Image (cartoon, grey):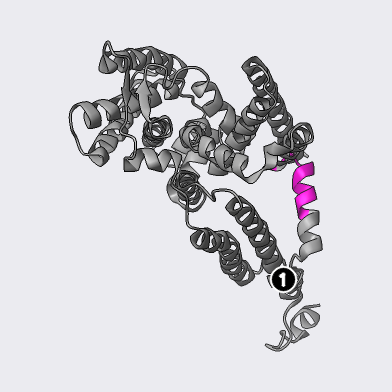
Amino acid sequence: MSKDIHSAPPPSPSQPSPLLDRSDVRVKHAAGIGDTVSAFVDRVRSGDLGSLPVIVGLVIIWTVFTSLNPVFLSADNLVNLLFDCSTVGVISLGIVCVLLVGEIDLSVGSMSGFASALVGTLWVNQGWPVLLAIAAAVVVGGIVGALYALLLNRLGMPSFVSTLAGLLAILGLQLYVLGTDGSINLPYGSTMVNFGQLMIIPAMVSHVIALLPGVAIVLIGLRTRERRRAARLSAPSIGGLVARGAILTVFLEVVVSYLDRGRGVPLMFGLFLGLAVAMDYALKRTRWGRSMNAVGGNREAARRAGIKVSAIYTSAFVLCASFAALGGVLTAARLASASQQAGTGDVNLNAIAAAVIGGTSLFGGRGSAWSAVLGIIVIQSIASGLTLLNLSSSLRFMITGAVLAIAVIVDSLARRSRVSHGRA
């Protein structure tokens, strides 16, 4: 028996062992386009819907409004829609941060209104340089966010309560800063107002920027592919990566070309997308981003893993309030004024709804910066379509509320499906 065991010759360097051979099979079974589609179907079945529901919803909304009024999909109307998306969209980026850690900020609307009032007062009434006034407003927003985090970390005050109290307090500050006049007109023809109403990215620059996402997909995919192959794991094929990059590039180039038939791509929307790209990178490619998802998924497990939970909460609230302040500045630029009505009305609703409709989970631990982009496009599409049809704004609230309810229901069902799939 012993002789039989030791008599088998060791595998030669040119003949890999059976274990290595099976690993090679996994490496060679690179995912082509067909396998990529199969993997996508498997993810959907497991409850990982990603952006699929909001994209389907957006297609339905655009189809309905275009059939009722063809002007809806005109280049000029879409350009105006993108202008309007940028203001509340930036605020929604901050909402994504707090939702990721399982918290909420109900004062983003008031914070945006107060920031616009602060910029108007410091710039127009006090004679500060406009950039310094904007920086001061954003810093004040960050301080308010740090205060919310302090109340949560030190006193255990629920964010729902602290930010609701903040909503009222900040609204009072806004009224106090504006004084008896109630509004401040920003100088027409100033760079800030032109940025919010007129500035367009040059056509050539827009087309170059439209190339970058596809190139990034290919380059990042190739890098990931090499790492997975080195670890003897399945890796996507080069053809599949190139196909994905090419499809995205063609789509974006067509969109840019169509918008150029109107005024072009708004520079303010370009700023919004730039912030979304930066946030997406931070949330997916950095230790801080992984910690954000971990804290939102399970706070106690994250603490035991060595994550400074209080610091993560602080960063989330500071970013949320800072984005709210920046959104208020953009709103003032868009309207060329700061008034008592800024930040009130449906700003809170739209900012929170955009993040949730776009795919960020209310339960924490799942979401992305692109949720804010997709969600605000859905909301502004509804508003624009109803305006073109000359229908009451009450319908916009009802339809937006229904879409929000559907998004939460889909999120709940997907979450339940992921849990049951994991147990299986």
Residue 275: percent from left, percent from top:
45, 46
**Horizontal relation, residue 293 to residue 336: left or right:** right
Look at the image and give the residue range highlighted in magenta. 39-51
Q: Name the residue type under label 1.
A: Gly
User: Would you place residue 397 above or below residue 271 in this image?
Assistant: above
Q: Residue 213 is drawn in which quadrant?
A: bottom right
**Which quadrant, please, contains the N terminus?**
bottom right
User: Would you place residue 52 above or below residue 40 in this image?
Assistant: above
Residue 64: percent from left, percent from top:
77, 33
**Horizontal relation, residue 254 to residue 168: left or right:** right
Q: Residue 378 is drawn in which quadrant?
A: top right
Q: Say which of 312 and 110 sits in front.
A: 110
Q: Say which of 235 and 73 sits in front.
A: 73
Farthest front residue in view: 189
**Horizontal relation, residue 155 to residue 240: left or right:** left
Element assignment for label 1:
helix
Residue 254: percent from left, percent from top:
66, 57
**Which quadrant, please, contains the C terminus?**
top right
Point 43% across, 45% down: residue? 288
Q: Which residue is mark 1?
A: 239
Residue 360: percent from left, percent from top:
59, 35
Would you say residue 407 is visible in this rendering?
Answer: yes
Q: Residue 215 is drawn in which quadrant?
A: bottom right
Point 44% across, 23% down: residue? 109
Would you say residue 361 is visible in this rendering?
Answer: no
